[in-house]
Amino acid sequence: MLFHTWPFVLFFLIVYLIYLVLKDTRFRLFWLLAVSYFFYACFHPLYPILIAYASLVDYTVVVRMAKSSRRKAWLFVSIFNNLALLGFFKYSGFVTDNLNVLLSSLGIPYAVAAPGIILPVGLSFYTFQSMSYAIDFYRGNIEREKSFIAYASFVSLFPRLVAGPIERAKNLLPQLHKASKISTQDVTDGLSLFIVGLFKKVALADYMALYVGKVYAAPEQFKSPALLLATFLFSWQIYFDFSGYTDMARGLARMMGIRLMLNFNNPYLATGLGDFWRRWHISLSSWFKDYVYIPLGGNRYGKFKTYRNIFLTMVISGLWHGAAWTFVIWGAVHALGRFLTRELEGTSFYKEKVPRLVKQLFVFAFVTFAWIFFRAENISDAWLIIARIFDSGLANPYCPLLALTLILTVWLYQFIYESTIRWVLETRAVRIGVVVAMIMYLAVFAKSSEMPFIYLQF
Amino acid sequence: MNRSDRRETMEVEIPFGSNCVRLSGYEWFIVAVVVSALFYFVPKLWKQVEKFSPVSDYRLSYKLSDDYWLFSRYCRWACSRLGEAPSRSRTDEKTLFIGDSVIWGHYVSQDNTLSYYLNEVAGRDKFVNMGVDGIHPVALAGLLRYYCRDISGRDIILHFNPLWMSSKKHDLQIEKEFNFNHPNLVPQFIPNIPCYKVSYSKRISAVMQRYMSFFSWVSHLRISFFENMDLPTWTLEHPYENPLKSIMLALPASDGYNLSENVSWHEKVIGKQDLQWVKLESSLQWRFFQHSVELLRKRGNKVFVLVGPFNEHILQGKNIDTYRQMKRQIETWLQQNNVPYYMPVALPSRMYRDASHPLSEGYAELARQLFKSAYGGSN
């Protein structure tokens, strides 16, 4: 059940109306939990068992941690359990594949059977969220959650269940506890967020996907211009897809009086790779910063260790996205980019002489290049695409001008949003005009698709 | 970052978003009014600017078979023509001829269809070809219910093509999913059609098209001007074209007739067939045909039913017996329900293109028979 489909709209209307009735009663959390589990069960009837297990373990771990002097051991149990879940469901295939390659290359005539396990939707998101609760409690950043229902609702809250944002207990749990005060502004804000997200997903991301999918499915059949354009379009496809999902998730939660964190902040206006990661998938970036980068030492032990920590964090982040070497390389490429822009940002020439627009375009170009590894089916495809971009010659790319026009319009909007003439976008006429235009475009021109969100696979 | 820094970071106010699209309740109200007005008025205005002027013996273009918004417009046009001269007697009124490709005239030109020959026999422009290519009775019931609300108090000849009961697949009774014609017109939820397995989202979209003419108008745009594709897919095929320029405000001229197909089934070397007829009492198609008759009569129409003529020459051995048994059952139902009908015997073999479509000569012959049966030879 995807946000941009009619069944979800019906589901939400029913859920929301009952939620409004129950919001001041003690049944509110029960209702939230029940509908969140139902929502998850729509993907697979057994998934709720998995999330209930993950929630129960972390809840119990923290209960034990609160009463025990062996806090570290209990923290280890939580981390081990969450990583084991991820390892089993997400990485077992990857491990056996690589093991078999290794055995084969060593000439050992034995192959480990592929486990053939399907990755449960959203597992990477809720295990990280649940794990952060245990770590935060261990660090003394939060109080123990006394109600299991509240905790299970925190882990499974349906708007953010399958693709984040990865919320922190400190932000979300208190909101779940207090009786929701839903103002008119919450409802209208929620609608505003939802319509923007819907437009990003249905009108833009799914449109870009048509061209990208065609080119990336058979890169050997396309020449440099088509491959370049497909990569450019994929940059926007993934942004529109994921930020569209997040906008819708935040909008739905907002309508229920719950404020989820901002997850995307115009990332293609970033002036450096560090800036990019403060704008892209913010909830994951900050998670890795707080629970991986800083524990590794952060930037406290000299340049070499700083770069080592950045590298490790980015590679692990890459692996989080998918169990394939393409994601590992994608993470490593970003780490290298981070080194580069960090060094450049240290020079007065780059800081003072290079125009902001040039920095933005440079970062965009770099991020777009890295997306090749993210999108390619495998490493050899990625290398093939890079090679063909440079030496396959020219040919008409047959790229729809409408798609490029839409992208440039959005990009221009974002530039204006972060400029001194932002007031133009804030005028009532423009805001209303933009919403009417989005709704009419969706109604008349958008592709009637049920394409899943890209990040559901992670 | 130390612990207090982290706490500080977490406690900052959560920003709304990264754009200015944030409307108040009043502004959403304005949006609702503007969008509702556009939804309501755009299709109506469209009718004023898009030229649609059917002439005698007109039939909807083959390419527009799925364009129910246009069909609805066609119905309104046909019914308004009927109402042009209220002083005329009932016999002066036009008769709407509704059915599938047999009525539309799949293998013949516009001036060789059944309605054309009926007009010729009648000596005046009396019969309107409202055939829709590929429309089976289940879909036809949907078409009549949702897109032909203007048809009331009219004379109607409703065609029933037994071909739709010639197998469980034709009767939509198999479990395996397959692409059948006009899926948006069949019941989306109840009764369940076993071979119709599209997502709930698509089903809800189909239902919305029925009740909100704006969405069927959108479908009209896609079918008429974007080769039955949505805009994104169309732009992939025509990357450098301006989509707005494709909207010509005039409907496709060709009616989709292919002269080379106008040859008999013998020449096409179609062999005899062993059809697995479904039983009338369990047939979905027949049940929905009955619904159509009831619906049209409920709306005050005079309904005359034409059954077949099926190409019995194509049937093998016992198949003919089963078919004739079924025909008798159909006849009984029509008699019991006082529905006037004509059930012709099969036309000569050479007059058929396949199992159910007559060729020009066949249509001419059928027109003579039908006119005689329905009007006693008098016009």
Image (cartoon, coloured by chain):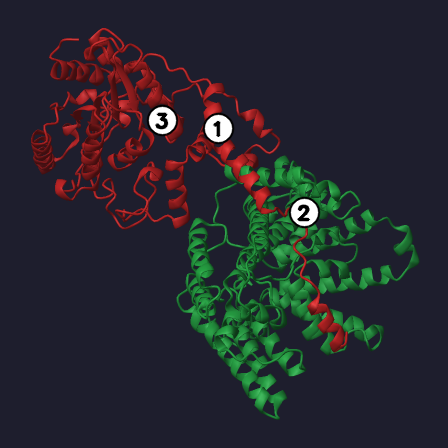
Mark 2 vs mark 1, CA separation in Å: 29 Å
Measured as percent of width and height from the top left, residue A163 is found at: 56, 61
Disc 1 target residue: B41
Measured as percent of width and height from the top left, residue B35 is found at: 52, 36
- Label located before the other in sequence (3 or 1): 1
Disc 3 target residue: B72
Instruction: Characterize the local packing of mark 3: few (<14), some (14-19) or many (20 or more) Cα atoms within 10 angstroms.
Output: many
Asked if residue A367 can be seen in this view, the reply is yes
**Residue B3 horizontal side relative to residue A210, left or right:** right
State whether residue A330 is above or below residue B95: below
Measured as percent of width and height from the top left, residue B156 is found at: 22, 22
Chain ID, red in image: B
Farthest top residue in view = B123
**Residue B123 horizontal side relative to residue A105, left or right:** left
Q: Amino acid at mark 1?
A: Phe
Chain A colour in the picture: green
